[in-house]
Image (tube, grey):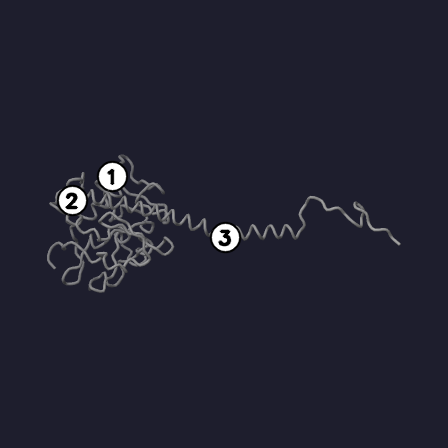
Amino acid sequence: MASPAQPGSLGWARRGGGFTLIELLVCVGIIALLVSIILPALRSVRDQAKSLICMDHLRTTTFRFRLFADPYTAADRGDSSNLTSRFHAADFLDSLYETQEFWKNAGEVRINFRPGEEPVLCPAGPRQLSRVKGQAAHLGGITPQQNISYAMNRRLFEGPTRTGMLAAVRVPERVLERPQVPLMFDGDGARSVQLRGGVTDALFAAPPLSTERSPYSSGAYWHPGKRHRGRINIGFVGGFVVTTSDPLADTNWDWAYHPPVEGPG
């Protein structure tokens, strides 16, 4: 009768310090499970951080608008300096983007905005944007148009007339008394190019309203950028910023406001 195998013999091999194939597969499976749990959480944190930076940019923009609109704090309104108690929205954009009469870099023709540092660039949007010397922001001074991150409320630029057409407006200084008027918000420049193709579209946007019959009613001027997990950030004339999935749901927001149009109509 054969004797039982002793430790160290071929019949009873002592297990070494390595892992078996099954143990390795279990470890790989556990790591994969942990990664699948952690990555969405990290992605969510990153998205939230970008949204917070975006909101801070919009808050900075609303603050600069209030300085621009207030006659006691407005240092330079560009061409609007010749107006009394009013200004053009286009001049505010020129001051914001430092284009046209607000150009500060002598000898340079094109300047790239710095991602993460410029309040006119949403961190969740395209990161390549430039300003061009000698051109107003809304007339080709900001390029490429499809990379524009933020849109200004177009009703502060053009308002509907009694005949249903659009005409230029001048923003009164008293707009500061209307804090619920949306000022600047996430925009999708690529959509504006697709819908309209003109140089002014990406910088301005306005939603269609059921109470109004005008070119805005078609929705062609409305291109919000819901790039924060389906949400859009909106800065208001009052200086506050809101994030929402439905920018037209709150009836307290004054999307319908527009200054009186210039000229007849």
Please report whichever mark, 3 or 1, sits nearer to the chain's N-terminal start: 3
Please report whichever mark, 2 or 1, sits nearer to the chain's N-terminal start: 2
User: What is the crowding at mark 2: few (fewer than 14 residues within 10 Å), some, or many (at least 20)?
Assistant: some
- Residue at position x 87%, y 53% in the image: 2
Q: Which mark is nearer the camera, 2 or 1?
A: 2
Separation (CA) of disc 3 from disc 1:
49 Å
Q: Give the image location of residue 22, x and y in percent.
A: 65, 53
Q: Amino acid at mark 1?
A: Trp
Height in image: 33 above or below 79? below
- SS category of the residue bearing label 3: helix
Separation (CA) of disc 2 from disc 3:
55 Å
Are the two marked residues, 2 and 3, in contact with CB atoms closer than 8 angstroms?
no
Q: Is residue 83 left or right of residue 182?
A: left
- SS category of the residue bearing label 2: helix
Q: Amino acid at mark 3?
A: Ile
- Residue at position x 12%, y 46% in the image: 85
Q: Is residue 222 left or right of residue 32?
A: left
Separation (CA) of disc 2 from disc 1:
16 Å
The numbered mark at residue 80 is 2
Are the two marked residues, 3 and 1, in contact with CB atoms closer than 8 angstroms?
no
Instruction: Read off the residue under disc 3.
Output: 37
The numbered mark at residue 103 is 1
